[in-house]
Image (cartoon, coloured by chain):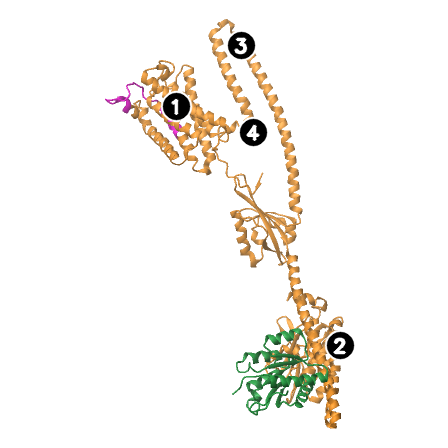
Amino acid sequence: MIPMVQLAGEPLVILLVEDNEAHAELVMRSMRDQRVANIIYHVSDGQQALDFLFRHGAYENAGQSPRPNLILLDLRLPKVDGLDVLKTVKQTPNLMQIPVVVLTSSDAESDIIRSYDYHANSYLVKPLDFKMFTKLMQDLGFYWLGWNAMPHQE
Amino acid sequence: MSILNAGQPLDEGIPRHRPPLYRILGITCALAAVLIGILGLVGLLFGIPVLTSIVPGLKQIAVSACLGWIILGLVFAFFVYRPLTGIKQDAAIVVVFVTAVVYAIELPLNISGDHFFVEAFLLRTEDAILPISSTPISPLAVILIIASSVALFLLLAGSRVPVYKRQIGNWVGILGSAIALVSFTILLSYLYGNPFLYGTVLIPIAINAALAGLFMGAGFIVTAGPESLPLSYVTGPSIRARLLRMLLPLLIVIIFVQNFLDRTLFTYLPAENTIFVTILLVGFTVITSYIVGKISGVFSKSLEREQLKRRIAEDAERETNEYLTNLFQYANAPIIVWDPQFRITQFNHAFERLTGRTQQEVIGQHLEILFPEKSKNASLELIKKTLEGVRWESVEIPIQHINGESKIALWNSANIVDPRGILISTIAQGQDITDRKAIEHKQKLLIKELEQKNAELERFTYTVSHDLKSPLITIKGFAGLIEDDVHKGDPVQLEKDILRIITAADTMQVLLADLLKLSQVGRIVGPPEKVGFDTLVHDAVNLLAIPLAERGVAVEIAPDLPEVNVDRTRIREVLVNLIENAIKFLGDRQNPVIRIGMEMKGETPVFFVQDNGIGIEQPYLERIFNLFEKLDVNSQGAGMGLTIVRRIIEFHGGKIWAESEGAGKGTTFRFTLPASGDRSTDNNNNSKIKE
């Protein structure tokens, strides 16, 4: 039942955009235990996320900022808002194919609508319950990095 | 009486549709003249003296006189029968004109006693067309014919110039009277056996020619109609007309009777009966006097009745006027009347209230004094349109009160014209909708404010739910992880995870405390008091003495800070928050300085708290005031300090904003406050609305 996840032996890269340190740790520790080989890059605000994706500033070196296979995006972020990051990613030809999964504590209808308006690939509300949280993280990894087919990148 | 918006066309001086009696009389007179002309011709042709001179032996009518009366009489009859139009009218005018000219040219010739040239052509040539002999025409007859031509010409041509119809009617009537009078005098002279012009160098006029002239003259008089001279003197309800109507026939009768008596009695009675004749005459005079007296009595009685009627009518009119005047003066709506030169002629009390000006002040003035400079020209354009008969319905024209205030009013107008349709004045009635407009405006602003508040509230609840949930996820999450740690027997990780939980719980506590504070800002604002701004600044700096000293911050406070009228505790809180904020974001700057002072921006004092810390980049300058907004995730606090600051400032009716040259360039927070004695917190809402 475990899908094939290795692409040419390369580890799968996740960009985690999360301003709350504790939440970031929760996500990373929940995903660490699963069998999907992945590297998680964590940035803590919207500006850093864009810098990472466009290889600006501190992320100029391509080796430090590989193209992610998945972006986990919180909505309320300092400096550049999560929705603005989403909008930018989905408007940039080079980046728009990267699946962006919104992962937030907000279940506000307006956030959901706007996220999909900006072409989010999925919208997940952080569960309050820890077991659910862990389960969601694992399913998320399997689905997007395992089952989900993506075009080949050069 | 004036008529509102009367669009009746101008009454014609000579009405197209004359009263039937006048038409019949006119046609009869014209045809009588024609008949005399024709009979005269026939008489001349066949040598019938009765037809040529009525009494044999008298002057015969001339051929040209016959022709003249026939031509003019026919044209006249046609004209009265049915007013000529178009080409027919043109032809008639030409005929009449040519007739007048021909007779006028021949007048001097004729005075010398010669034949008229038409007659000369008809009678004198070798091969004369008419085998008749005729005396030359009298110059008097020529003059009568010319006068008739002119009258006829005026009638025909007059219908083309409607403006002068009344005058033309009068001219025709006067000419007709002259013709008739001259003819009548001639007839009288014949009647008394002393024909006119007899025995002079000039040729006398024939009796039947004079008769034709009388008919033509009478025809002109009736055709000029009762509205024109001379009939206007004897028609209509005026006293003069009525008096003349009664006395004229009486006078004529008396004259004739007296004359008749004179002649017959003195001729036929013997001389010794002179005494009898005298008695008869006295008797007749007495009877006449009695009749005249009786008539005068009847007349004066009817005159009295008339006066009584008029007085009643006048009373009624006065009463109506009083109603109208009161209605006009005390109506709640402003009403104004102006003449075609746009000078104010009437101005009611409501208008006085609207403008603050008095009637005496504005009457006779140009309308423009009522309008605000800004909209004056546009309003005057609208008003000019009333000259062309435009009526306003709910036209919006602003009016200026003398205190400078602009009032907005909706206007309706109507034009008042005289019976001839000429504009006398325009009346306009307004409705002051300034308050309505102001309320509408206020309403709009309130709605906007409410929408803003609503959006703010939405954002608030959303933020609160989101941000309160966040530490809860952390707590539950790490509680779960602790379980793992215990299983794994990893005490280091366990300790870390517990710390996470504690931190999250602390965050929640701060959040809740701040939220409480924020919710109180709206409710607890103490009464404003006058306080020196420097006092507030010193209080705040003293409260923060320890953190300021720890960080080694120099605080520079500007001298001469003004008094402000504020809730002292709250504004001190603002200052504490701003200074704390400045300390928090000083970065690793050497010689950190916080400057507090005031600058005048126009009339408004703008206070500032300035630091030389890490600064803020342009895009974030507005966002920093949002709830839970933190530019740096690592900074302390829940991100509510500046939100609270803004709320307090806004509750005081002020504004706050941040300025920064960019990262590393320091930040300046600027805000406005109500000055002492200026605005209190109570009317802040108003001042906000005015913005």
* Front-lying residue, B217 or B448: B448
Q: Which residue is mark 4?
A: B238
Say which amino acid is labelled 1: Val
User: Which structural element holds mark 2?
Assistant: helix
Say which amino acid is labelled 3: Thr
Chain B takes which shade in the image? orange
Chain A takes which shade in the image? green
The CA distance from mark 2 to mark 4 is: 96 Å
Q: Considering only order in the chain, which callout, 4 or 3, is on the residue closer to the N terminus?
A: 4
Which of the 4 image quarters holds residue B300?
top right
Specify the label residue B34 is tagged with. 1
Q: Considering only order in the chain, which callout, 2 or 3, is on the residue closer to the N terminus?
A: 3
Give the mark toward the camera: 1 or 3.
Answer: 1
- A125 over B57 or under it: above or below: below
Q: Chain of mark 4?
A: B
User: Which structural element holds mark 3?
Assistant: helix
Q: Which residue is mark 2?
A: B516
Give the residue displayed 36% in from the left and 25% down from the top.
B68
- Position of residue B83 measured from the top left corner of the image (x, y, whole percent): 43, 32
* Front-lying residue, B541 or A68: A68
- Position of residue B233 measured from the top left corner of the image (x, y, whole percent): 52, 28
